[in-house]
Amino acid sequence: MARILVVDDDPVIIRLYQIILKNAGYAAEIATTGEELLVAVNRLKPDVILLDVILPDCSGLDLCSQIKKNSELTGIKIILVSGMEIAPSQVAEGIAIGADDYLTKPFDPKELMARINNCLKLKLVEEELRDKNRELKDLSNHLQNVREEERKFLARAVNEEVGKLMTVYKMDIDWFHPNLPVYDEYTGRTISHDLK
């Protein structure tokens, strides 16, 4: 079951979230301050956070940014929720700091669940993609190791063949040396050796 963390300081809104999520088959964990959120997010590692933009102790935007920058919390989806009409520039700011969606209160329960379900689908796809990337990285490392072993094997094989050829050439030179004609520098004549 998906873990949903609701962060809001309004008891009526919290109760509304609980009813909607319960009807959809989800259990909601609750935090009413930014401090509670930070404790809960590290303890629960929720799939989705419904985060009010204005909390009594801090800004929801700052908390969103803090969570998104934490590599240990990768993959958590955050839906920013505002009790007032949101200007497009505010939506853009929220998305720029890492929010995955934006919602305005009052909201329709179907819209809320559609946004949560979209975040859960996106989270699942991202997890699958991260797993595939890990597999590809492992495969790439394996192929690199295989290539290195092949290179070492070929280097040894070439070295052995060169060694054998050098031995044959040395044997041929040792045999030919006494049997080849020699040029005499003093007389300017070629002297032949008797072949044995």
Image (cartoon, rainbow, N blue to C red):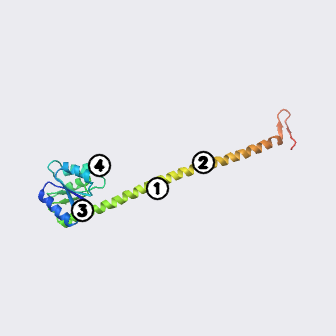
| Of pointers 4 and 1, the one earlier in the residue sequence | 4
Q: CA distance from mark 4 to mark 2?
A: 47 Å
Say which residue appears at 67% left-offset and 47% top-offset. 162
Which residue is more in the foreground, 82 or 49? 49
Q: Name the residue type under label 4.
A: Asn
| Of pointers 2 and 3, the one earlier in the residue sequence | 3
Marking on residue 70: 4
Image coordinates of residue 135 in percent, x first then y, are: 42, 57
Image coordinates of residue 117 in percent, x first then y, are: 26, 64
Q: Is residue 43 above or below residue 176?
A: below
| Of pointers 4 and 3, the one earlier in the residue sequence | 4
Secondary structure at numbered mark 2: helix
Q: Name the residue type under label 2.
A: Ala
Label 3 sits on residue? 116
Marking on residue 65: none
Q: CA distance from mark 2 to mark 3?
A: 58 Å
Q: CA distance from mark 4 to mark 1?
A: 28 Å
Say which residue appears at 60% left-offset and 48% top-offset. 155
Image coordinates of residue 182 in percent, x first then y, are: 83, 39
Q: Name the residue type under label 1.
A: Leu
Q: CA distance from mark 1 to mark 2?
A: 24 Å
| Of pointers 1 and 2, the one earlier in the residue sequence | 1
Q: Mark 1 and mark 2 in contact? Answer it, CB < 8 Å.
A: no
Marking on residue 155: 2
Q: CA distance from mark 1 to mark 3?
A: 35 Å
